[in-house]
Image (spheres, coloured by chain):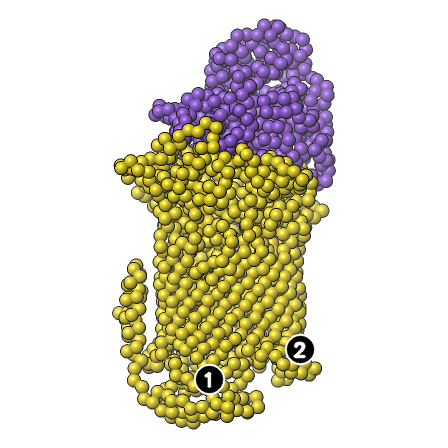
Amino acid sequence: MKRIYRILAVGALLVSQACTDLTEKTYDVIPTDQFGRTPEQQAALIGPLYNSVGNYWGNLFWVQPSTDEMMIPTRGGDWGDGGQHVRMYTHTWHPVSDNGRFDGIWSWIYNAVTAINLQLASVTEPATVAELKALRAFFHYVALDNFGNAIIADGVASGNPPQSTSKQMYDFVEKELLDAYPNLSETVGGAYYTRFNKYVADMILAKLYLNAETYTGTPQWNKVIEHTSRIIDSGKFTLPSDFFSTFSTSNQNSPEIILATAFDRTKRTGFNIEMPVLHYRQQLEFNIANSPWNGPCAVPEHYYSFTDGDIRKNMWMVGQRYAADGTPLTDDDIPLVLNPEVPALVMPGGADTRVRGARAAKYEIQRNNPVEHQDNDFVIYRLGDAILMRGEANLRLGNTAAALTDVNMIRERAGVKPYTAAQLTLDELLAERGREMSWELHRRQDLIRFGKFNGTWRFKPASPAHTKLFPIPPTQIQNNPNLKQNPGY
Amino acid sequence: MKGNLFFLHSAFRVKTEVWRALTVVLLSLLISSSGFAQKTVTGTVLDATDNSAMPGVNVAVKGTTSATMTGVDGKYSISVPNDQTVLVFSFIGKVSKEVTVGTQTLIDVSLEDETTTLSEVVVVGYGTAKRKDLTGSVASIASKDLNPGINPNPLQAIQGKVAGLVITQPSGDPTQNPTVRLRGYTSLAGGSDPLYVVDGMIGVPINTISPNDIETMDVLKDASAAAIYGSRAANGVILITTKRGKVGKPSISFNNYVGISTISKRFDLLDGPGYIEAVKRAESVKENPGDPLADGLRFPKDANGNYYNTDWIKEITQKPLVNNHDLAISGGSQGLTYRGSVNYLNQEGLIKNSGLNRTTARINLDQKAFDNRLNIQYNLAYTETLNKYAQNGAIERATMFLPTLPVRNADGSYYEVLGNFSLFNPVAMIENYTNQQNKKLTQGGLNLRYELFDGFTVGINGQLQRENGVSDYWTNPSIKAYTGDNGRASRSYFEASSKLMELTANYIKALSQESNMAFLIGYSYQQNDNNGFQAANTGFVTDFVTINSLGLGSGTLINPSNNYATSYRNQTKLISFFGRATVNLNDKYNVTATLRQDGSSKFGTNNKWGIFPSFGAGWTISNEEFFGQPTGLNYLKLRVGWGQTGNSEGINPYNSIMLYGPSGTYYDGSVGDFLPGYAITQNANPNLKWEVLETTNIGLDFQIASGRYSGTIEWYNKLTKDMLYNYSVPANGVDYFTSSILANVGTMKNSGVEFSFGGAVVEKPKFSWSPQLVLSLNRNKIVSLSSDQFNAGQVQLNPFGGRGLSDVFASYLIPGRPLGEFNYVPTFAGFDDKGVMILSDSAATGTTTNISQSDAYGAMRAGNAIAQGNPQPFLTGALSNTFRYGNFDLSFQLRGTFGNSILNNVRSNLMIPQSILETNMLKDVNTMPANYSQNQISTMWLESGSFVRLDNWQVGYNLPVAGKTLTSARIYFGGNNLLILTKYKGIDPELQTKGDLESNTSRRPNSMGLDYATVYPKTRSFQLGVNLTF
């Protein structure tokens, strides 16, 4: 009997001690108040904010078929994908049907901004503050360019900020970058490779001004010249004679790069451009781990716009393909000859359909790669772009001579004849930008600025003006009552 | 005997050996049961209620076919072999009586009314109750009622037995647990599996229990019954009581069976010659027909110049054998009883290189002392399981790989079509793959009860459970399908331990003969700890060591990454107070109230504690004076219950707090390399709490024809409130870090009717037939997915897979609609002359070939999605039957599902003439337009999923034994899935129906009603077994 009472007493004691303690004992996660104190910890928090920039390519590549340089034709049973690529190409996307695509971009931008804002709330060192503000401005600029009427998020807070107009977004990006500018580093490369320094800020500002008329109705060509000149005249960037060295698997050494995001096939995966682009059987050409997906290709007219002899034309894979051992490849019973001509946006099945379209290999395809991801860093901004931007601004301001100097610098490297003053029209400049900046994710913005985005090209009918902005994703509108859908949707 | 047992334990490889073994066993049994000495016994059988003579009572000599019946005067006469003979007196509606003859020659008996189902003791959680006193919805399955057949998992053994408990075995994979859903889908992220309580331990993995060890399984279906388990009870509670020893001499029982299985149905794929013909047909309609047969890659020829003809399904499957051996010993004295058992199960998989091997051992001891005031139950169980997981990708590839290809090249290497996106040699995949887990579970504890004074009992229940496991994974990178894995080999270890301590106090007071009241209060503390790690490497130059010497891989050196070594650890605590009060008055009125307060460390700081109340009342109408004695209906009881239960199993530890966690890697230019990054990995939710399930249950229990038939009708309404889900959050740059938050927002509703009815249709001395029917109807509806703070946003589910079908989904989550409803499937309207599928257009008056302009897309954009089908059945039911003829018995169960739709994603991918060079196709491809090439989602692929299956059957023979040692012997022959009646064109309409989320961080529920080619085919199995008791 006594033993029982003793057991009960012990039990009762256990109850009184344990019954209210429900705090979670954490083991493999770090509560926020336990981290971010040492410089190493702060670096480990600020670093991944750049990691978000690395998702630039993955998020924006798939909306490039809205331009005249890239298409994803339906190839028989392949790449129908619920009609999404046809909608993208013909500018008939719909907020509901394409919510996922646009919400992906929106969430990428603003989740990155929240993380930046959280660090900005605790960081005081001026150079770091400036760098983070420039980074935040960059994401706002991407939101402005894609969605127009987006959100200005300038600090951690609770509750949804109001929707801003394109003009307000523009003003915010400009102000933030100009404020941050004095405290940004002038170092290029080394510790500052992939990071935001003065030149990256100049480039974002130059892009902002270049498209100021799109964003605000008021052009800012002189400011484009001012900021691109700061980059071009800094002497810190040069055009390498080998055009493709800026896109190689070891392109981190290119002196042309202003801003890149670093990728590694295993340490920082995510750059796998070879997979969507290559023909299935080109697995054997490059001896890569998996069979690629045979999707995006050049709009034929875009491919045709490269003259023979233009070094840049070598970015396109056309003609007979060969296995790594040199044997000619076949597909079913026909030779694997990549044919730049695409007969229809929706093609019937078969080998002849599969070989259609010129494939881009601007970014070096990594041979003998045991994994699906590549080592090339993705170049967001580079000197060639800055030079062409200054040329465009000068041309628009009537400074044709200055414009010729810049544009012909680019043409010279490409191994094509320089333009004469008569040849250098705005249309020609857009075409030259197309060749130089092909598939670098600038085309949509360029077409809009030149008033061509809603025009027609092969298989693409004229589209309504409202498609210049993507729709605000319905998932965001449902969760943020401050957001109104962009006009026209 | 020893020699025979040894024989049984060795693995039978050939059927004839099985027969031989059985013959030996049977012969030895017959020898032991010889020696008869006749005498005659006479007597009268009376009805205990009024002492009237009972005609027609069956009087049988136990263990033999010898039997007689009482005459009109209730008298009988029967000759018996010897004094040890036991006579069995049985009559419908009466409790059977057994009398040992001894020296008697005149034996008079009186038979009591059968009230078995009513006086039966039901386990209700922290105690027991008599069935007649229940107010909640509780279904009990005794061991004798478990499904026959090959059912290594206890859930398979109760499939179809309980109305409203839908148990789905979605494949033939022996390592796969059945999916259990009680009364519909009540949750998205809260977890949907019932709570398993085994001998007082909460949260025992159900697949570690041998069905042979189970005495009863009690299913607490409504809140009135389950609320005593609080925040984890919303999906129902399944209480398992294992067999325990009884006072008496040791009893030894052997239960052994062997079985063999075949594939129950195959895909009707093209064979080699059929494929070639279909290729020609597809080519003939092309604008410029070529000669696809000239492609030596797809149409190689053997040494004799002939095309190959390989049956890939056959190549990857086998006729698997199953062995089950069970030994149990029980007995004991007044103070101590014991039962020990060992069970060995080896179940080969239909797919080669897959299977299940399980050994369980269990010891149950019961100690009584101090005039039976002290009762201690000890239990100790150990289970070791080896799961060899099938390569499901190879199953799909076997449907795709061309029949014109050989398994191997002349040099012995595997035949592969290099540089092809869809063709991978499935045999190579299966033979060069390791994916297995070896798990060990130890569970033990003691449950002490001490009656301090009359009616007042205190109890302590302490249980400890530890499960650990080692998983091995490796693929050979020289195989085409695995090159991208780069030969990754990994070994991972996990350990999950759980400690449970419960203190209870019980008081029972009898108020009168037919009235009593009882009170229970208790406290419970449970702590779960999980930890584990994984080590991996890639790039082995030999496949000799891999997993067993990870350091020999080159990956860590030349392809560095931060995923080669990982680990985790977490802990949760659940603390509870609970109580129950029961009053039973005059055998007419029953009232039960329960209350549980649960506090969980997983919940947010603002909601650590939750209260779960329930009330239930019962009224035995048939015991009222006014009820009288209407003919036929002799028992009628109305039960009404209401209560709230919680659902929190879906909440992972640390989900409510803001955390820094890993965030990939980032480039640090100052070191010139990548470093691990940290970031906020989840949105904090201090309000996170359990999901609340509010259930109203009304039940009517009845018996008719003097208790010969009994049944229950129940109606329920279940409302899930504060539904857990990964809701979308606004990406607004100021307060959310990731795109979703685990929060309590939405509402889901399930309502339905359940009916179960059964009894003895025929009960004759030599022949009896007892069928049992259960039916359940359920209606599910998502009521809401938003609050003023959160909104689910646009959630698509049911991905319609295949080439060219990225981001194509058949369903959206829509408030007002059932979960999983096919509401994004365009209506099929034929084919145009180019072979393009025509769909109804969004005006619903015309047609289109552009899916973006189809009716389904248009309706979704307009906000009034069209319902094309529901993957949830309208009705599920089962009919089980037991026949007895003399010493033979036969049982079988028919189970069916009605009214659900299936989107046949296998058929849609294997019916494309113009893709025939990419993959093999079904024979039916020839019914499609030869120029059809664009894989398209439409109602063409929607089919009825209704089916009736002969789930299991068994024919048994009880050998007439009366030896001193052997007390019973039974041999049986049976099987599973003998036939299925369905119009469904796929392999099997019984598909995975989980309805929970793809992963803890996902917003997408798992597919419902979609058939994929990766599904492990079902088997039809045959079983031969013997049960012996000594």
Q: Which dot marks residue B621?
A: 2
Report if residue B672 is visible in the image.
no
Residue at image point 42% right, 67% down? B954
Judging from the image, what secondary structure is the residue with disc 2 in? helix
Residue A477 picture location, percent across and down: 69, 39
Frontmost residue, B416 versus B840 = B840
Q: Rate crowding at label 1 as few (under 14), some (14 to 19) or many (20 or more) other CA atoms within 10 Å.
A: many
Judging from the image, what secondary structure is the residue with disc 1 in? strand
Q: Colour of chain B?
A: yellow
Total numbered badges shown on the rendered structure: 2
Same chain for the residues under marks 2 and 1 in the image: yes
Q: Rate crowding at label 2 as few (under 14), some (14 to 19) or many (20 or more) other CA atoms within 10 Å.
A: some
Residue at image point 30% right, 59% down? B13
Q: Is residue B653 above or below residue A324?
A: below
Q: Which dot marks residue B58?
A: 1
Q: Is residue B905 above or below residue B147?
A: above
Q: Chain of mark 1?
A: B
Report if residue B714 is visible in the image.
yes
Residue B991 picture location, percent across and down: 51, 53
Q: Colour of chain A?
A: purple
Q: Is residue A264 above or below residue A428?
A: below
Q: Quadrant of the C terminus of chain B?
A: bottom left
Q: Quadrant of the N terminus of chain B?
A: bottom left
Frontmost residue, A235 versus B753 = B753
